[in-house]
Amino acid sequence: MVETRTKQAADLMEQFAERTGLTERNADRRYLWTDAFAVCNFIALRRATKVARWGALASKLVERVHQVLGPHHDVEHPTAAGLRIGKKLPERRPNEPFDERLEWDRDGQYFHYLTKWIHALGQLARDTNQPKLSRWACELGETAHRAFVYDAGGGKKRMYWKMSIDLKRPLVPSMGQHDPLDGYVTYLATCSDLIVAIAEFAAMIEPRSLATADPLGIGGLLVDAYRLQQVIDHHGRGDRRMPDALLTAALVGLRAFEQQELRAPAQHRLAFRELGLALGLAACESLHGVVCERYLPLRKDIEGFWLDPANRANDTWREHEDINEVMLATCLVPDGFLREA
């Protein structure tokens, strides 16, 4: 018998597949972050249910993402030019003034979305034993490192936060708070041969600057701590001090987050950001000697709130329906995203 959480996740992912056109011949409603988590969810559902259709949907989604979000359509090297975000508005033109509000809705390429896709390809490669998926992941890793990392002078490297679709100009030149960490953990796990890139990412990480009160960011720290610990335990790669540093930074954020109002009405809350924290707490449960054990009940609180249909019956949920439902499903069946083997 399929357990309740798996059934709930399956229902959410079935709705996502139908709503975004994945089960139809013509589909162009693709968004890279959401689709990366969706691939991992399909992997988890195939493992949990032994139903081959979920694995077929994971493979189909990879194909569709490369078709729709790839700047070119080289079937042998579909990730070699990166992958665009999938935003509704076109990217800012070279002579167009910067508008911070509009930039959030404009297309381009994000490094932290590319690392999510590298991870999804790596998870599917391990699950299906298809070497081409690993090759595509590492080709994307090479492209992302080359495009986003630059020499800031004095022997220091920095990263752009957002690049144009053709990867020729930065759209947002500032560096994302966790982008070097994202690169370090993801490349160690999936593209370990990219030694120079891994070293450059490591050199940019400042553990004392990683703390954040953003629930999605806190969840990311917890997930990265767990993923990195797996890489260290299984492959002997990576800085053995880093998982503890990430947990310490996450604990700072959790202390700040618990002061925030979780009893706010659903329409004033961003589900996918809270669900990112719930996913991090799921990872936290698998870490031994974890320092944030007192916060683990938050996972149940967040999941329970968003599983209630009444809390999903508002414009804020519907505005982000795809990412909300996929992230909720990831929390319910986290194995496909979290397990690095």
Image (cartoon, grey):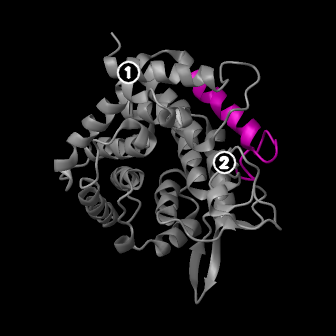
Specify the label residue 257 is tagged with: none
- Judged from the image, the secondary structure of the residue bearing numbered disc 2 is loop
Q: In this view, does 327 lie above or below 163?
A: above
- Nearest the viewer among 37 and 30 is 30
Q: Horizontal and vertical percent for residue 196?
A: 58, 70
Instruction: Identify the mark at residue 6; answer none if there is no mark.
Output: 1
Q: Where is residue 201 in the image (x, y as percent from the top left)?
A: 52, 68
State the residue lying farthest toward the top.
1
Left or right of residue 293, residue 78 in this image: right
Q: What stretch is highlighted in magenta?
A: 55-82
Give neighbour class at mark 1: few <14, some 14-19, many 20+ (Cα, 10 Å): some
Q: Does the magenta stretch include residue 78?
A: yes
> Residue at (81%, 43%) from the top-left corner?
74
Q: Find the residue positioned furthest to the bottom.
A: 154
Residue 327: in magenta span: no
Asked if residue 142 lies left or right of residue 2, the reply is right
Q: Which of 297 and 95 is in front in this view?
A: 95
Q: In the rendered picture of this protein, how many numbered marks are placed on residues?
A: 2
Q: Is residue 87 or residue 11 the one in the foreground?
A: 87
228 over 196 or under it: above or below? above
Report x, y in % for residue 292: 21, 53
Mark 2: amino acid: Ile
Nearer to us in this view, 270 or 230: 270
Can the viewer see residue 124 in this picture?
no
Q: In the rendered image, which quarter contains the N terminus? A: top left
* Residue labelled with disc 2: 85
Mark 2 Cα shell of 10 Å, populated few (<14), some (14-19), many (≥20): many
Disc number lying in front (1 or 2): 2
Residue kind at label 1, given as amino acid type: Thr
Residue 291 at x, y percent in the picture: 19, 56
Q: Mark 1 or mark 2, which has the lower sequence index?
A: 1
In what element is the residue under mark 1?
helix
